[in-house]
Amino acid sequence: MGRRTVTMNDVAREAGVSVMTVSNVLNDRSNVGPETRQHVLEVVDRLGYEVNLTARRLRSGRTGTVGLIVPRFDLHYYGELASLISDALAADRMHLVVEQSGASRERELSALSLARLQQYDGVLLSAVGLDMADLDRIHPDLPIVLLGEQDVPDRYHRVHMRNVPGARLATEHLITRGARRIAVLGGKLTAPRQEMATHRANGWSDALADAGLDPRPDLVIPLQDYSIAEARARITDVLAAGLEIDGVFAVTDEVAIGALAGLHDAGLRVPDDVQLVGFDNLDISAHLTPGLTTIDPDRPTMVAESLRLLRRQLEDKNAAPEHVVGTVSLVIRGSTRN
Amino acid sequence: MGRRTVTMNDVAREAGVSVMTVSNVLNDRSNVGPETRQHVLEVVDRLGYEVNLTARRLRSGRTGTVGLIVPRFDLHYYGELASLISDALAADRMHLVVEQSGASRERELSALSLARLQQYDGVLLSAVGLDMADLDRIHPDLPIVLLGEQDVPDRYHRVHMRNVPGARLATEHLITRGARRIAVLGGKLTAPRQEMATHRANGWSDALADAGLDPRPDLVIPLQDYSIAEARARITDVLAAGLEIDGVFAVTDEVAIGALAGLHDAGLRVPDDVQLVGFDNLDISAHLTPGLTTIDPDRPTMVAESLRLLRRQLEDKNAAPEHVVGTVSLVIRGSTRN
DNA sequence: TTGAAAGCGCTAACAG
DNA sequence: CTGTTAGCGCTTTCAA
């Protein structure tokens, strides 16, 4: 119970060698005789020794841990992303820990403080609320890859989706299938800086304009937190206010799920009365009724690219910044007509 | 760019004080004169100094960080749990990081190694695949609270749900609303040790027996990973095989979502042909069509209790182990009849 | 192939 | 109120 933690020193004394030899054994360095190695490992096992990662990190700087910072744990998109990354890193014998940055600016800054980030060998940062100034505060020596749709300083490595083409694809599909009054739920026409909501509203707007349709401002329904509940409430509001629509492009699948519920509340059938397209292709989207037509951002490739950029920086801290843009494709399911 | 990281020493020299004074200022200790404090803070700001948490941890043992270990990031239940915990800890000026333990036994053991756990002031462990031996390997000095439904050694602090009563409540509700052939999707009658799936199958079985119904083994449909896709596939299988049912108790809401899709695939209407009840009351469950009747485990209270147990151990490492069992309640929505 | 010395950056304990 | 000393547990460096 109260017995003191076993240290490398204890192992060394017990094994009759120096701490350096123990360290060499545990780090698989080649300069240890086979018998010594065997003996040390036995003692390690017997005493139940485990390395103190904090001490190792303080001395060597390496941790074997990558941090992923996401806005919220409870948005499905980030849960799926975290799973994919965790699995991919495990193959490299690295370890993922996830932090939540959202909810408040204070907490976001706390999560992004150098003090916290320093604890990782590298960081995948999927923060939405940052501005350039915040990003510029981050110490440049730490390998960072930005995941996400806001614009960032050029010196950062970054992976993001083709937002505008994706949104355009979604909207064009709605038009092709006969929709004419298409709202963009969660879109924004203007914002202090470009972000997911403005990019996707732009794609929507482009597609409408190309088809000779008017991207009326009242068809743009902005959201705050992109939760299912908020999306459902807002679409209910605008329908109650008399907005007439026969199509909805929801900027995320999560928003689309709320839209599905809200449309149902209003007695509108999907896809018969109103067609619906989302963006993200969440796991759950295939299992809704009707299945959700959506834009697939090819997350596995985005994850692979993110880790490639991270590894590049790990190997060469001066690696030239790279911007990777993922492909998007349309996945057609029951929420749009045949 | 390549400039060396600023240390406390740099601040001390620049401010013309000792490192201890800098440390005292940064830790808000009361023994620093107001002018000295002011001056030190200015220098800290000017140099852009941030504390090295690794060094602090090595020396003081405290990290301000709590770890949450969950089986998978992409199960909605854990995402919601993590969000709640993260928010609650922020109020205590503590920080949550989340690790995924699932996917393989090797990775589970790696996440649970003392080396990793040591990095936290305390750990909330929501691992499902552990057995007693694994748990016994964990160093007893670390504050741990177990969240979850498997049985554990008495010496652990633990918070879990009233599984059997919850499952019973769900099943009784189905019976009350007229269902007679009720399957338990994701339940298990036997397993190497008690776990969520057996507890909930027991509640189902008890309710059926009380009502004079036969808990036939073919009504128990076990699952492996409790994913939506798996649940959908399995219910499709058993329906195709000719199983006749008018009610489904799904052991989690995630499983219920799969069931909803599978029933729809088979041309069965919910709740008209088959009634459905889940367990967990996920955020999304209110927004399905139809809304999902489910068991609410009162997660906010469970989270509060978990953190209370953790704080107790933080304050007194010999605090007597406590087992807390949360209450459950039935939330009635459209997936059961009126 | 092995070991001794030094020190990563910080804070506990105590002295002034 | 401020400073000095020592050392957390490990790994780097260099000597044997």
Image (tube, coloured by chain):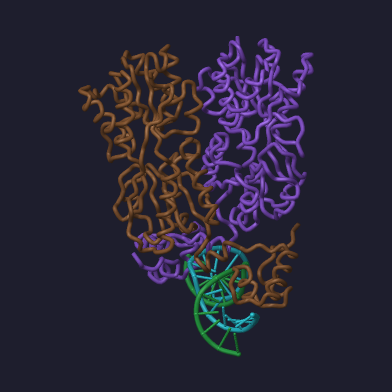
Chain colours: A brown, B purple, C cyan, D green
Residue plotted at (33% across, 56% down): A321
Between B300 and B1, the residue placed more toward the observer is B1
Residue plotted at (65% across, 43% down): B127
Residue B36, image x, y percentages: 42, 64
The quadrant the C terminus of chain A occupies is: top left
Residue B236, image x, y percentages: 60, 23
Tell me if B20 is positioned left or right of A249 in this view: right
Between B54 and B226, the residue placed more toward the observer is B226
Q: Is residue A278 above or below residue B84?
A: above
Q: Is residue B178 above or below residue A1?
A: above
Residue plotted at (60% across, 55% down): B116
The image quadrant of residue B295 is top right
The quadrant the N terminus of chain A occupies is: bottom right
Residue A182, image x, y percentages: 30, 21
Tell me if A246 is positioned left or right of A98 in this view: left
The image quadrant of residue A313 is bottom left
